[in-house]
Amino acid sequence: MNVRSLWELLFTHRTLTVMVLLFLLAIRLPHIGDSPFGYDSWRQSDTEAMARNFVERRFNVLYPQLNYQGPMPNYAQLELQITTFLIAILYKLFGYSYIAARIVPVAFFIGSAWFVYRIAARRYSAAAALFALLLYGLLPLNLLYSRAIMPESAALFFYTGAFYWFSEWIAKEKRSLLLAAALFTSLAICEKIPTMFVCVPMLAMVIAKYRGGVFKRLELWGFALLSLLPPYVYYAWLGTLAESTFVSGIASKHIVPRFATAAWSSEARQFFATEIPKAFTWTGLVVAAAGLVLLLVRRRDFPLLIWTLAIAAELATIVAVIRFPYYMIFAGPLIALLSAGVLELWITLSRDPNRRRRGGNGRGFSNRSRLAAGLCAVAVLAVISAESYRQVAPVIGIQNDELIRQAEVVERLTEPDDLIVTGTDDPSLLNASHRAGWRVTNSIPGDTVAELDYFVREGAVYFVPLKGYIDGDPDGLLRRTLEERYPKLEAGSEHYIYKLR
């Protein structure tokens, strides 16, 4: 094999795609074994704790259990636990390992990246599709949460897959493709309800294709039934089972009352002004905005335009209420796809019209234009990579060492079935201790001692402050009560606990 043949073999488009996917995987591996007690430790540690509870208590994906709100079981009305159940399977096979816990969301994210690439490849050139793939994998929000022990990566996988398979069905009308789209849509909604917004561009596509006959298509009614009924049944059934009321009915309690007005609040405006540039970088936003303008001017690819409008509606009605950065993650595929449209235009404008006069087919590039297009794409990716590193590097690898040391004391001094109370509203300390119980929530306003008495009556055995800290006790009344009534274990340490019985 000569050098040229080897070069062509190494740099075929398929090989380049695999190399890019491997690169996106590789940059997610540093600190892959970190505990969930870093950024968003509440959400990460809850997810990991549910996986442990599957292993140790009830190995059934339909019965997720949290560690707080009293003795087990603590069934909770949460998303379908695909991520946690896969982690639990790995725990059973290989033992407890945070590497196993993180590799599951990373794998789901790489799968979503492949779907983003395939969506881009149907619309743009091969080069633009690779650009979309790289940009999608480098966005700060995606880089941070694709490796988090959370369900977001799985939701992204099913969400992007739903759009891809439905688009394929629109083009080819094979029922197997529609069935795959229904399965992915249903699982996406089971994972995260906001993924329902992907149904908006789907509806636009079928109306454009069948117009007035859309409601006569039985397969579309079947698609709607298979997509929406399982999530409804799952959430409704789990609502009857749930004991942990804190997370029950989040949509009805928090989102529905405010979804029409939340986007206009000062809190939402400040959140978006701060968090959107951090999530997607100013460069990514500018290039994506240019791509959106192209969609409007050229009046092409209306499903992508409708999808963009649907995500804007999701940001305005759901994210504006919840205001957690990771709720914006479903905008990531659109940022990548819209940006790829800009590169595609650049490539189109770079085509050399003189090739035909020289005997070519009129589809080639001048060397200068090709180089300019390539350098432009590399520059955009380089700037986004630098900004991602600046955003993510200070967060990845940082652990809450005090919380971890406090949890080690709890595990050493208590029995696995002992119920504990933690002095923080955040349940991360409960999860780190691998114990069930309660967290100080100040649910009895102005009477922290009455809340403590309630916990003791319900069976709490230990009270655990976080290195002496207790939430909601500014005057120190609860601390003085604990000191007067109960013995302190590890009194000579900063990480002491109180024995309640």
Image: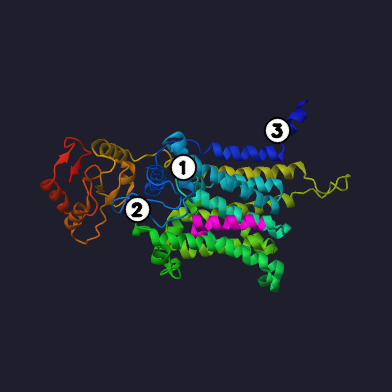
Q: Position of residue 210 (x, y in %)?
A: 71, 69
The residues tagged by marks 2 and 3 sit, at their Cα atoms, a distance apart of 53 Å
> What quarter of the picture does the C terminus occupy?
top left
Tell me, for residue 74, which label it has, or none. Answer: 2
| Residue drawn at point x = 47 percent, y = 38 percent | 90
Magenta stretch holds residue 244: no
Magenta segment range?
A: 177-194
For the residue pair 443 and 75, the one nearer the viewer reads as 75
The residues tagged by marks 1 and 3 sit, at their Cα atoms, a distance apart of 35 Å
**What secondary structure predominates along the stretch shown in magenta?**
helix
Based on the displayed image, in which of its 4 quarters is residue 369 positioned? Answer: top right
For the residue pair 157 and 338, the one nearer the viewer reads as 157
| Mark 3 surroundings within 10 Å by alpha-carbon count, few (fewer than 14), some (14 through 19), many (20 or more) | few
Instruction: Name the residue tied to disc 1.
Output: 87
Observer-side mark, 2 or 1, equals 2
User: Element under label 3?
Assistant: helix
Q: Position of residue 461 (x, y in %)?
A: 21, 46
Instruction: Identify which amino acid the numbered label 3 is placed on.
Output: Leu
| Residue drawn at point x = 43 percent, y = 68 percent | 256
Sequence-wise first label, 2 or 1: 2
User: Element under label 2?
Assistant: loop
Instruction: Identify which amino acid the numbered label 2 is placed on.
Output: Asn
> What quarter of the picture does the N terminus occupy?
top right
Tell me, for residue 10, which label it has, or none. Answer: 3
